[in-house]
Amino acid sequence: MTDPLRDADGGEALRRVYEAAGPYLSSLADRPVHDPDSQALLGQLWHPADGGALPERGEGAAAALDRLLRVGTAAATHSAGPRFFHFIIGGTTPAALAADWTAALLDQNAAFRASSRLASEVERIALTWLRELFGLPATYGGALVTSATFANVTGLAAATHWWGERHGVDVAADGLAGLPRMPVLSGGYLHPSDRKALQLLGHGRNTVEIHARDGAGRVDLVALDRRLAELAAPAVVIAIAGEVDTGDFDPLADLADIAERRGAWLHVDGAFGIFAALSPRTAGLVAGMERADSIAGDGHKWLNVPYESGFAFLKDPSRLPVAFGMPGAAYLPGEGSALPTPGEGADYALLGPDSSRRARSLPIWATLAAYGREGYRSMVERHLDLAQRLARRVDETPELERLAEVPLCIVCFRARPAGVPEAALDEVNRRLGAALLADGRVYAGTTVHDGRVALRPAIVNWRTTEADVDLLVDVVRELTAKVVAELG
């Protein structure tokens, strides 16, 4: 095969993907998350006829897809399945998956209204529905981005330009040169993606001052308020809605009070915790979020849409084109056309960090249209129940120890087998975490919480059931016994 124009197998390749999809998706409930024996198949992705080098002559779409499907359905980490509890990764709802295929089929550039009015308008609707889902004021606006990290970049970029204005500097035009370091304050729950966002924006990841009142990282409100008073200058406060070890929350309303009193910008990193707003049982955890200047969220966590899908909301959406508008080019729309127009969407390339942009709004639109507020509330509450079930199973198991309360969907615990001294428990749990990932039946990695190595499985996949949670506990117990035996 020498030219895609002459490839008669294009339709056949699509048919084979479709035919493989049903059996693969149906198998997820019974597959291990990771099959170590399948990893040898990865070598088959190299082209054998050319010794692994880029082939001079291609094999055609159908043959290439056959090979990719054969290897991929076996050797992939099956994180779309119900027993992936690592990294806070959701699955993909049926509606979102079908819409993601549609996004690839239509291949829209969602940068400008002129490049795709369809993509632009669907994004406007998707953002409106997300805003309503989370109970944010109608004045908030935003953009879809690739991830929670870039949602944090978006919010903190707007904060940077706000901060520059207060020093009489147009950061978009002149950059940060000559300005003092931007003060950024947070509690100990700060996520590395927030530091990465500050790093990308030129502030440096170490610019954040941490004010924590204990080893777990709970924010010290008194110390943070005192520090803002000492600064007597514009500053940024980062609040965490959903800490990744335990699912705990910074007190958003208290931080909003402090930020308003001290004239600071409040950014809320709500990557997965923002979904607490969906249930009356947990909505109190995000009380005060609606007063934030910027909010970051992640769609491929609890929304259960495919990668790459994040979103950012701003109290004053007119700040987005200030931060992300591009200098003039005759063929591109100007900054004045950036904000949404009913029925036409917006020039979203001027409202976020991406220029050429995939139509990532289609899966969001489809899953919200398919399941609505009620469907997502039901899913979130089912996961809340599953997290409490897991907590009870841990509490009832003598060789396991829960390390924190369970306000949301994460259960932080460790193995504590009888007869193992305290000094050896971290090593036992490190080995247990490695054994879990190598075993592959369930997937849950380790963290260090309040100085102790622990597991922190997160339940955000729409497929997860009580049986999957129970299997996690059973496998942890089995592998704990093996680790203790190996250590002697």
Image (spheres, grey):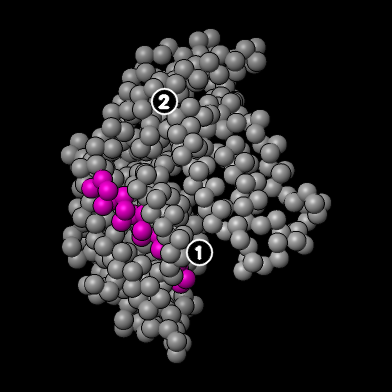
Mark 1, mark 2: which one is toward the viewer?
A: 2
The residue at the point 40 percent across, 76 percent down is: 115
Q: Nearer the viewer, residue 373 or 135?
A: 373
Badge 2 density bin: few <14, some 14–19, many ≥20, Cα 10 Å? many
Give x and y (percent) for residue 487: 64, 16
User: Which quarter of the picture shows residue 159?
Assistant: bottom left
Which quarter of the rendering shows the C terminus? Answer: top right
Q: Is residue 12 above or below residue 41?
A: below
User: Which quarter of the picture shows residue 472?
Assistant: top left
> Mark 1 is on which residue type?
Leu
Q: Nearer the viewer, residue 29 or 86?
A: 29
Residue that protrudes farthest toward the front in the picture: 8
**Which sits earlier in the primary sequence, circle 1 or circle 2?**
1
User: Which residue matches tag 1?
Assistant: 200
Q: Determine the CA span between mark 1 and mark 2.
A: 39 Å
Q: Is residue 374 above or below residue 444?
A: below
Let me know if residue 108 is in the magenta part: no
Q: Is residue 486 left or right of residue 397?
A: right
Q: Is residue 301 visible?
A: no
Q: Is residue 63 above or below residue 262?
A: above
The residue at the point 62 percent across, 46 percent down is: 66
Counting labels gives 2
Q: Is residue 439 left or right of residue 153?
A: right
Give x and y (percent) for residue 432: 56, 24
Which numbered disc covers residue 468? 2
Q: Is residue 427 left or right of residue 321?
A: right
Q: Considering the whole magenta stretch, tell me its main secondary structure.
A: helix
* Region of the chain picked out in magenta, as a range: 353-372
Q: Is residue 470 visible?
A: yes
